[in-house]
């Protein structure tokens, strides 16, 4: 963490300038927030686990010929990424009803949708990240029609892949959030940004439906650190024999 200038400190990560043009360093913190920053805490070791999980999943996704911002991992908490012009949207892909959609639309918790549902939220903490329509996105020029088409197609492809990928590890992918950005080198190129980790995915055990993601923190369910470790174990990233202190 020496000689790097901090550009931004977010709720879960710090962004530093990279040492090459158009690169950044993502530093993963143990800080956890929920309900738009109303609940704050720490999940011991989360930053390291999310750094490893996000590296692992971004690499998997790039095997599908989907471009991501990931360049390389630098250490246990930091990775080098491509600096992107972030599209100010949170793209949520839902397979099973839980969380805000249950409250908003009154659908039954745990109901499996006949097709995955894609929703867009405006990235704006002051406005509580409101849900927005494709028309809002186009009229307010948060993304062009062509970009939206690409975002939807990439999101579906990632969802199809991850559904099976997690299922093979006895995990149900309930829903998850993606962010996208434009490459500075080629403005037409859209890449997957931010992170893919239990902070922004809902992951339930296939047999027991035990929640193995940030909902354990959001809802005070206990076993928070253990659940992040469990996901890393099932992905083969952490050995199950390792204790909290070792990683
Ligand atoms: P938050 O903004 O919700 O507090 P974080 O603590 O995760 O989130 O901060 C990371 C910030 O970095 C986010 O605002 C995210 O949009 C941004 N970001 C992620 N990937 C990139 C990238 N490749 N280029 C530029 N910014 C990025
Ligand atoms: N999500 C996220 N960041 C947010 C809001 C949601 O990563 O700021 C993820 C969340 O982890 C879940 C999905 O998006 O996997 C859908 O979240 P939902 O809208 O149900 O949010 P809630 O308000 O219940 O957190």
Image (tube, grey):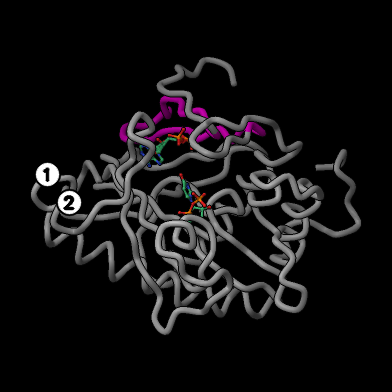
SS for callout 2: helix
Q: Is residue 137 left or right of residue 238?
A: left
Q: Where's ligand 1: which quadrant?
A: top left
Mark 2 neighbour density, 10 Å: few (under 14) some (14–19) many (20 or more): some
Q: Is residue 182 left or right of residue 246?
A: left
Q: Residue 240 location in percent, x, y? A: 86, 59
Which label sits on residue 137? 2
**Farthest residue toward the bottom?**
114
SS for callout 1: loop
Q: Residue 155 location in percent, x, y? A: 36, 66
**Farthest residue toward the left?**
139
For disc 1, the marked residue is 140
Q: Are marks 2 and 1 in contact (CB under 8 Å)?
A: yes
Quarter of the view holding residue 82: top left
Of residues 18 and 43, the one nearer the viewer is: 43
Region in magenta: 12-31
Q: Residue at x 76, y 55 (%)?
A: 227
Quarter of the view holding residue 247: top right
Q: Residue 92 location in percent, x, y? A: 40, 59
Q: Residue at x 16, y 51 (%)?
A: 136
Q: Is residue 41 left or right of residue 150?
A: right
């Amino acid at each position: 963490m020496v000689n790097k200038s901090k550009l931004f400190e977010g709720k879960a990560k710090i962004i530093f300038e990279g040492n090459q043009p158009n690169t950044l360093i993502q530093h993963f913190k143990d800080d956890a927030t929920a309900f738009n920053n109303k609940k704050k805490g720490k999940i011991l070791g989360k930053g390291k686990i999310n750094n490893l999980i996000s590296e692992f999943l971004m690499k998997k996704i790039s095997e599908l010929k989907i471009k991501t911002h990931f360049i390389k991992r630098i250490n246990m908490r930091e990775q080098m990424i491509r600096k992107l012009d972030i599209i100010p949207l949170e793209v949520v892909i839902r397979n099973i009803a839980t969380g805000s959609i249950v409250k908003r639309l009154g659908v039954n918790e745990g109901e499996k949708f006949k097709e995955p549902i894609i929703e867009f939220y405006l990235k704006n903490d002051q406005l509580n990240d409101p849900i927005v329509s494709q028309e809002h996105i186009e009229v307010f020029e948060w993304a062009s029609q062509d970009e939206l088409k690409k975002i939807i197609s990439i999101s579906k492809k990632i969802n199809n892949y991850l559904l099976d990928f997690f299922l093979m590890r006895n995990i149900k992918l309930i829903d998850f959030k993606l962010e996208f950005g434009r490459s500075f080198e080629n403005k037409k190129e859209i890449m997957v940004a931010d992170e893919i980790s239990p902070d922004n995915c809902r992951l339930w055990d296939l047999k027991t439906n035990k929640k193995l993601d940030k909902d354990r923190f959001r809802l005070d369910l206990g076993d928070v650190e253990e659940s992040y470790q469990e996901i890393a174990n099932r992905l083969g990233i952490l050995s199950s024999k390792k204790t909290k202190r070792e990683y």
